[in-house]
Image (cartoon, rainbow, N blue to C red):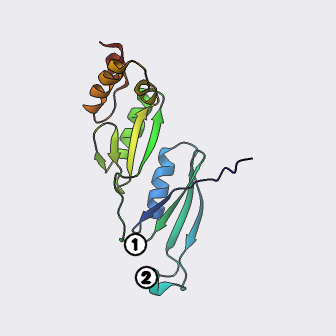
């Protein structure tokens, strides 16, 4: 029997862990903050955080448990890691794109950075399926269509897939 470990992303913030957890939980229905841990006096010479300040916030989005850590300004987010939101329809694409990009930065091909610098991909669930189509010309048309977009437009992607 194979062991199935749970993988829980840990997001390193300067001092916005609690704010970020609340922000993400406000966007994704059914999300919730599970627990908050605080810095104590121990380790102050290493972490330089006042006792009683938030160290970590554990929160759940769907079935995924995240930890948001207030670790200081040492590390910054970049596009090497992104979180994908697979959307069933344009209404979902519009909702998540609007919420996650608010105060952040829109990027190409369905990518954005939220106000904390975390990279997200807001993607119609049909796109990965289209990219695996054996018709290479269809894949080329779809690729050309979404590469020209910021927020992805499902109808335009479907038109490209159909050759229209």
Label 1: which residue? 72
**Disc on the earlier residue, 2 or 1:** 2
Between 140 and 57, which is closer to the camera in this rendering? 140
Nearest to the observer: residue 118 or residue 78 = 78
Q: Residue at x 60, y 46 (%)?
A: 63
Residue 107 has which mark? none
Q: Are marks 2 and 1 in contact (CB under 8 Å)?
A: yes
Can you name the residue that lies furthest to the left here?
148
Q: Secondary structure at mark 1?
A: loop
Residue 10 vs residue 61, the one in the foreground: 10
Percent position (x, y) of residue 35? 60, 63
In the image, taking residue 3 as reference, residue 127 lies left or right, namely: left
At which x and y percent is residue 42?
55, 85
Label 2's element?
loop
Q: How many marks?
A: 2
Q: Picture coordinates of residue 43 (x, y %)?
A: 51, 84
Q: Which mark is residue 48?
A: 2
Query: Which residue lies at the image location 39% right of the left edge and 41% below the top edge?
Result: 121
Residue 138, relative to residue 116: is it above or below? above
Q: CA–CA distance between discs 2 and 1?
A: 9 Å
Q: How would you rate the neighbour count of disc 2 (Cα within 10 Å): few for under 14, some for 14-19, many for 20 or more? A: few
Task: Name the quarter where the C terminus is drawn.
Answer: top left
- Give the x, y percent position of residue 58: 57, 60
At a point 36% along the width and 40% down the height, the residue shown is 98
> Taking 34 as reference, is 86 above or below it?
above
Determine which quarter of the picture holds residue 132: top left
């Amino acid at each position: 029997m194979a062991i199935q470990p749970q993988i829980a992303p840990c997001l390193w913030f300067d001092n916005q862990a609690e704010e970020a957890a609340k922000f993400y939980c406000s966007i994704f229905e059914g999300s919730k903050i599970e627990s908050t841990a605080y810095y104590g006096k121990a380790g102050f010479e290493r972490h330089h955080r006042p006792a009683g300040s938030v160290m970590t916030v554990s929160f759940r989005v769907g079935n995924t448990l995240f930890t948001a850590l207030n670790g200081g300004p040492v590390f910054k987010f970049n596009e090497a890691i992104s979180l994908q939101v697979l959307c069933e329809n344009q209404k979902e694409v519009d909702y998540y794109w609007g919420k996650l990009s608010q105060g952040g930065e829109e990027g190409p091909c369905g990518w954005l950075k939220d106000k904390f610098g975390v990279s997200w991909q807001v993607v119609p669930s049909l796109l990965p399926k289209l990219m695996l189509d054996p018709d290479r010309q269809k894949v080329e048309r779809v690729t050309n269509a979404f590469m020209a977009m910021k927020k992805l437009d499902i109808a335009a992607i479907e038109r490209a897939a159909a050759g229209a």
